[in-house]
Image (cartoon, coloured by chain):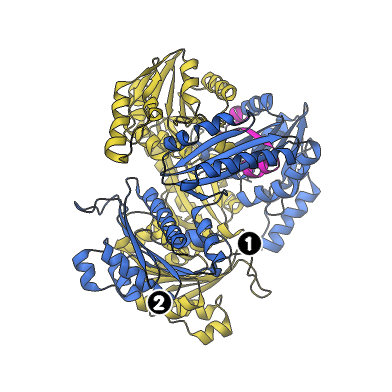
Chain colours: A blue, B yellow
Amino acid sequence: MIQTSIITIGDELLIGQVIDTNSAWMAQQLNKSGIRVARRVAVGDVWDEIWETLDQESNNADIILITGGLGPTADDITKPLLCKYFAGKMVVDEGALQNVINIFKNILNRPIIERNLKQAEVPDTCKVILNKRGTAPGMWFEKDGKIFVSMPGVPNEMKGMMLDDVIPLLNKQFQFPHIAHRTLLTAGVGESSLADMIADFEKTLPIHIKLAYLPNYGMVRLRLSSSGPAMQSIEDEIQHYFNLLQKLVKEYLVTNEDESMQQVLANLLVANNKTISTAESCTGGYIAHLLTQHAGASAFYSGSVVSYSYMAKESLLQVDKKMLESSGAVSEDVVIQMAKGALQSLKTDYTIAVSGIMGPDGGMEDKPVGTVWVAVGTSDKIRTEKFHFRFDRTRNIELTATYALNLLRKFILSNI
Amino acid sequence: MIQTSIITIGDELLIGQVIDTNSAWMAQQLNKSGIRVARRVAVGDVWDEIWETLDQESNNADIILITGGLGPTADDITKPLLCKYFAGKMVVDEGALQNVINIFKNILNRPIIERNLKQAEVPDTCKVILNKRGTAPGMWFEKDGKIFVSMPGVPNEMKGMMLDDVIPLLNKQFQFPHIAHRTLLTAGVGESSLADMIADFEKTLPIHIKLAYLPNYGMVRLRLSSSGPAMQSIEDEIQHYFNLLQKLVKEYLVTNEDESMQQVLANLLVANNKTISTAESCTGGYIAHLLTQHAGASAFYSGSVVSYSYMAKESLLQVDKKMLESSGAVSEDVVIQMAKGALQSLKTDYTIAVSGIMGPDGGMEDKPVGTVWVAVGTSDKIRTEKFHFRFDRTRNIELTATYALNLLRKFILSNI
């Protein structure tokens, strides 16, 4: 099987200043084309370490994809290093030069300086990949039957090159196997209990079908993976086992697609031609953000009142001032009034309201950090639930959002 | 210099199903303690590949930190592999067993099953690190003068172990150098122009001080890094160069701390004892989410109206229906009315209103995808600006949020 390694270059990756989202995206796209990523390595902007990593990875992999270190400044050393590694000399590439000039003249509208023109220089031992979204060209090298591709670290530039050029070119050069995955999401059951529930099933799986558990705080994703040369038989076989698996976990099944909770809810709303609104206190707009991340949200989503202050709860959601003072903002009474206020102002079929204490400060003896009240429902019927999360602020916000979306999902399903 | 490698284990990392946020966090924490991370490697749940990666990394590094693959299910093979790699045999650890029992009894409130008890088994060749937040114990191995630490992949469990045990233990065993960083953020100047602006300064930097450019779509972060045994001289020297650098870029300087745009704005508001609200259309709550990510937001933030529909703009922000129909939701007129509506309902000193087309659909000939109107200001004075972004939906939302926050920041500074 053809093996691929991804190398990302940059000191910022090794001091934790940025999170590497590029290699996850690359791995996803490669996987879809049947290209197996065996390793991902991040190294700093250090000559010897990059060199050694190129040696090491090309020992094991057939395809080595490299991102980062192609900027116009002195800390970017990938290009001179690759020039030496592949025994070339620097030459100006006419296509890359026209591209740089065009970007400065027509898009950036800035005067071009010497340093920018240097971006058009490449080792003469590479094939140039045009960068339609930026000034640093991609470079394709071949050596001892191995392929090395260097791309910029800027996400949208790298993504454009991968989709327009790199993956199509790899597909021309290699015959990749077909890879199939099936993923489902469960809620309300622990990883170990789930494992016991499907232990017999797991034993019957053919050796080439792998089962993975991806737990995420109370929700567990299960994934079946398989690969082989014959697409149809791979797909049929994995679907057979996936059908069995779904039956075994059906009590806890949220979705049989690899999709997020907000996508599951969005699909449910669109299928039933219903709309929702949200009234958020502690999640501070995060539920609204999740619901509007994907295009098409306006079909089912009207908006949110992010009522971070008492004032906002009173003026935009008509929450009773006395109730706020007597019950406190984190209470069943208030969250019900928030839900009713949102339904009234935004005139949607359903709503979600949340109020809680996300931490690290603000906890009280009877309402510790992690206490959350959620209300979901319609103008006729509201259902509430109290949660206790015990993580950090970021994680508490994420969990509140996901559990609130799931609560509305269950409400809709049990009231259809 | 002591070198560290981070190994993350899990097929999900190699098919791009999850983004690896663990190693960025680990690198950040290690860096603070003077522990240099030289490489980060991600491998799948494949016996030979994990084994080989352990060999390879321990060839170069002195400390090898491993996360993932410690769950109770069959796809988790890290523990048996480490048992074999360090020539041990599995034994029940009494402390780990009590911990598992305690978690099931007192926190999860679920019956304990055989599979969970197995979590308390560890190779007898390791020192156990108690996991206060979960059932999988951490394991500390030493071999040929190298240290290997295995931790669970669940973020809050790993984080707890790192801070409570792993970093303190490493600090006992080694004498790490002092590492110093200084980071500033610029806006409104390209990477190349910035590089030209500070080229002479860059030449005067001592060899042990590194300058890095971290461009992020129109904003560029500059970072100086240094390390050495004597804390005070390292700090004094880097501060000297950082002061010079700040002077050179002062026209474009947003902050001289390693902080986000929303933190810069939050600090400015708190320092002046001012409040803000937001009225968001296209960003769908993302600005509110950024402002409430950090604790203490209630000191300056009142809330947001996420007006995704015309209805929401009319009922919650008093936008004129006729204006919506004549000018369209993405227009200077509407965004001004949104700002005024938010100021009126939420009674804050300042507000930010945004309306735009994030894509991929919804573009028109005169308003292509990426067109955004932003209004910032007070009840006396509103400033607007039109932006054109040219990325994907996610990136357009992020950029709109950051540019809108920066516009308010500049408005406040020029009106104080």
Task: Please give the label number shown on residue A345.
Answer: 2
Residue B413 vs residue A212, the one in the foreground = A212
Q: Are marks 1 and 2 in contact (CB under 8 Å)?
A: no
Residue in view at x 40 percent, y 35 percent: B158
Q: Is residue A217 visible?
A: yes
The residue tagged 1 is B390
Q: At numbered mark 2, what does the secondary structure look like: helix, strand or loop?
A: helix
- Chain at tag 1: B
Measured in 3D between alpha carbons, the distance from the residue under mark 1 to the one under mark 2, in whole angstroms, is: 34 Å
* Amino acid type, mark 2: Ser
* Image: B150 above or below B394: above
Residue A186: x, y in percent? 48, 46
In the image, residue A156 sits, relative to residue B63, either above or below, namely below
Residue numbers of the magenta segment: A26-50
> Of residues A387 and B254, which is closer to you in this image?
A387
Q: Residue furthest bottom?
A: B322
Task: Provide residue A77's location: percent of width, then percent of height.
Answer: 63, 37
Residue B9 in sight here: no
Q: Residues within 10 Å of mark 2 (few under 14, many from 20)?
A: some
Chain letter of disc 2 in the image: A
Amino acid type of the residue tagged 1 in the rendering: Arg
Instruction: Find residue A400 and report its image quarter.
Output: bottom left
Compared with residue A83, is residue A300 higher up or lower down, i.e. above or below?
below
The structure residue drawn at horizontal position 31% and vertical position 70%, both measured from the top left corner, is: A337
